[in-house]
Image (cartoon, rainbow, N blue to C red):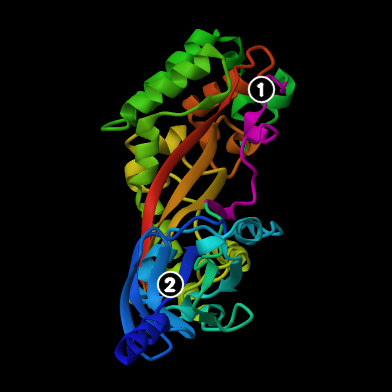
Amino acid sequence: MCNNIKNCLECQKNQFWVEIRLVDELNKPFGSLTGTLKDATGNIHAVTLTGGYLLLTDLPAGPVELKLETKALLTEAKKHKPRPMPQTSPAKEYADKNKGYQKSKMKYQYITLGDVWTFEPQIIPDRHRPGSAGQLLRMATNNSYLLEVKALIQLHLPAIIFQSKNPMDDEKADDMQTGDKTKTQIMNLGMFKPFNKLDYEFDLPASNHFANFRLFASSVSWGTYGSLTKMMIDRFEQNVGGKFTHPLLDQAAKEHENTDAVVKKVSELFASKLKNTKGELTEIDIQDVWDSLAKGPYAIHLPGFDTKPDWFNGLGITVHGIWSLQLSLKKLDIDIINRIFSGEIAFKAQDHFGLNVDDVNGGKYFEFLRIFRSWFLLQRYDKFGYKPFITEMNHIRKISGSF
C-alpha cells in the first residue's frame, strides 16, 4: 500500500506541461527549430519546435527555460519581416482572443532572440540581447505562451537606397523638348554659328536628315549592341515619344564597367555600415547610405556609357550619360555569426534620346558634326518637331562582403 501511494505521488510530480508558440511580429509562426528545455529539477529535455510550436508534458511543477540552437534561430529569423509601425501587435491580439492547451489563458510576451538562443554571437546589436524587449523571459509549467520575437532585420524591403538629383520620367528636361525653336533662334546657336553658315540644311527634307543620322550612327555602332542604334533612330522617326526599353539595353547597362564600379562602392559602404552597427540596418541607416552614395568617399558616378568601347558600340551616341538613377535594396542576407552579408540591388536608370541646347551651343563641339545638327533640327526645329523619348534600363546586381 505504501509503495503504491509513493508511486502515485511520484506520478503526480510529473503531471505538468508547458505550451510554447514562437511567432514573428506579424504573428507568422517560426519554422522548425531544435533546442533544449530545462525543467524545475534541472533536467534537460531535447525539444523540437515544429512550425514554431512545442507542447511538452510529464514535467515537474515549476519554472522552465527554453534554449534554441543559435545559428538555426538566426537563419530562421532572417526570413521574417518586421511589423509596420505604428501597427499594433497581431500576435497579442491573437493571444487575447484565443485559448491555449486545456483551455488555459494564452500568455503573450514580446521577446528578443537573445532570450532563447543558446549562445551570444560575437557581434550582435544590443536590442537583441536578453531582456532588451522590456523584461527577461520567465516561464513556468501549466501555462500556454505566445512568444513574439523582435524582428532581426528592421528594414522593410524593397527599400530605395539612392535617387540621383534629377527625377525619373522627367519630360521637362531641355533635351526632351520638341519643335520649340525657330530658324532664327537656331541660327544664333553655336560657337561659330554653323547653322547660320550652313543655312541650306534648314531646307533639307526630314528624310535627308534621317539619312545623315543613320549614316554616321551606323559607322560607330558595332558589335553586340549595334542593333540598338537602329531601333532608337527608327523609333525617333516614328515620332511616338514615350519610353524605350529593351533586354539588350538592360544587359549593356548591367555588364558595364561603370556599373561594376557602383556595385563595388555599394558593397564597401554596406560592409562599413554593418561593422559600425554590429550587423544591423534600420531605416535611419538607409538614409545614411543614400547620403553617402551622393557625396563623400563612397559617392558614386552615374553609370553611363562614356568609356572608349562605347564610342564604337553605338551607346556613346544613343545613350551616353545617365539623367536619373535609382537604386533599390531588394534583398539583404546578414550572417551575424560569420560576419558576412549578401544582397541584391535593383538598378533603374534613365536617359533621354534627345538633344539639349548646350549640345550644339559650344563647349561640346557637337555642332561641327552633321549628325548632331541633323538630330537637333529634326527634334527642335519647329518645321519638324520629332519627339524625343526616354531610354530606360533595369537590371539587378548582387552585392556582398564581410564586416
Q: In this view, does 156 lie above or below 229?
A: below
Name, please, the residue furthest toward the left.
223
In the rendered image, residue 75, in percent from the top left (x then y), is placed at 37, 66
- The stretch in magenta equals 158-181
In the rendered image, residue 340, in percent from the top left (x then y), is placed at 35, 71
Of badges 2 and 1, the one in the foreground is: 2
Which is the main secondary structure of the residues drawn in magenta? loop
In the image, residue 159 lies in the stretch drawn in magenta = yes
In the image, residue 185 lies in the stretch drawn in magenta = no
What residue is pinned by disc 2?
Answer: 271
Q: In this view, does 80 lie above or below 138?
A: above
Asked if marks 2 and 1 touch (Cβ < 8 Å), the reply is: no
- Marks 2/1: CA–CA distance: 46 Å
Q: Closest to the observer: 344 or 263?
A: 344
What residue is pinned by disc 1?
Answer: 178
In the rendered image, residue 109, in percent from the top left (x then y), is placed at 59, 72
Left or right: 70 with respect to 326?
left
Three-letter residue code for mark 1: Thr
Q: Is residue 188 above or below residue 97?
A: above
Q: Closest to the observer: 157 or 251?
A: 157
Element under disc 2 = helix
The image quadrant where one finds the C terminus is: bottom left
In the rendered image, residue 278, in percent from the top left (x then y), is placed at 48, 79
Residue drawn 42% across and 46% down? Answer: 306
